[in-house]
Image: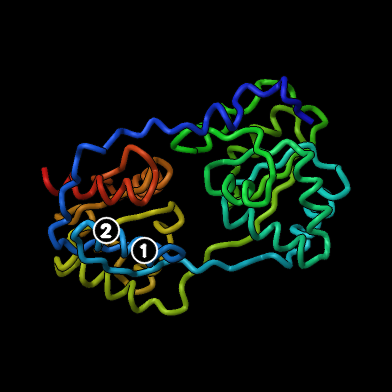
Amino acid sequence: MWTGKELICTYSSVAKVNARSRADKVPPSLDNKVIAFVESRMSSQMGSLITRHGGTPYSAPVLQEIYLKDDPTVHQIVHDMCSGTLDAIVLQTGVGTAALIETSNSMGLENEFLTALDKTTIIARSPKPASVLRKNKIHIDIMPPEPYTTKDLIAALPDTPLTGKRIAIQQYGAANSILSQELSNRGASVQEVSLYSWGLPEDQTPVVNMINDIANGQIDVLAFTSQPQVPNLLNIAEKHQSKDSLISDLSGQIVVASVGPVCTKRLNDLGISVDVEPEHPHMGSMIIAIAEYLAD
């Protein structure tokens, strides 16, 4: 197990945000522009942000979370944590962290799990899992600075050999092969677990309508808040023979906004250029960045 002396980047030292002060600056209005977004979990919050800043929200969720809390690998992680065989755990999402604790509760092991978790080296990828941990009075050893990418996470880890260490990684709906490979290369035995995966929504009508409205020039901005949204949108478009035309339309007059560098990279990799990316990877920052972009 890593000890406090080995840590080169602690939660208390990296959780500070160098946010640009906007106390004296009133952000410009979205001026009734139609802002489409494909967020599902926080769609109401996203819509409220857009409305608050003078825009017209257009919701078309492209993700449906499929929970895997009954998967044997999830139960195994709970048992391994309770038995003290894990040296560290990487928690990458708030939803996944909460689901892991809920699973321990359904197994009748929540108290044992939380006690064991608090004795383990805990690596939180971002404030979202950190928030869940704090609510459960669990410490945090390591958290990278913004924008919380895999590169930032790896850079925040102690530069020490991990030979013989057992490290669990809670995935964020898809495998993070770069992180797993890095830990394996340092000698760790890596155990991956997914608490949920991302499927296509059962009702895809809003997405199809949005694709048509983009083609007809009725949408001013399309905003992405996570990288899995990108392939899901294109998968739905492909099912309706409109993938190529959608990519072409997104290269036209419509403004494409991405919440952060991970999402931007996924968009770029799939042939979509990004016009707006906020300084800080948050929905609120993105809406302000969109308003500033449109005002220029």
Residue at 71% across / 27% down in the picture?
A: 186
- Residue 254 higher or lower than 184, as above or below: below
Give the residue at the far front of this rendering: 24
Q: Tell me whether circle 1 and circle 2 mark residues in contact (CB < 8 Å).
A: yes
Give me the disc on residue 52: none
Where is residue 73? Give x, y as percent: 76, 58
Q: In which quarter of the image is the C terminus?
A: top left
Q: Nearer the viewer, residue 183 or 241?
A: 183
Q: Can residue 76 be seen in this view?
A: yes
In-front residue for pair 115/183: 115
- Quarter of the rendering containing residue 24: top left
**Residue at image x 27%, y 46%?**
273
Q: Camera-side residue: 222 or 55? A: 55
Relative to 47, say whether 123 is above or below: above
Q: Name the residue under label 1.
A: 38
Residue for point 14% across, 63% down: 32
Horizontally, is 195 left or right of 163 in the view? left
- The location of residue 288, given as percent across then percent down, is 25, 47
Residue 248 seen in render: no
Which three-letter amino acid code belongs to the residue tagged 1? Val
Q: Which residue extends farthest right?
A: 83
Where does residue 235 sit, x and y in percent of width and height? 41, 65
To which residue does mark 2 refer? 222
Q: In this rendering, would 166 be left or right of 68?
A: right
Instruction: Name the amino acid type tagged 2.
Output: Leu
Under tag 1, what secondary structure?
loop
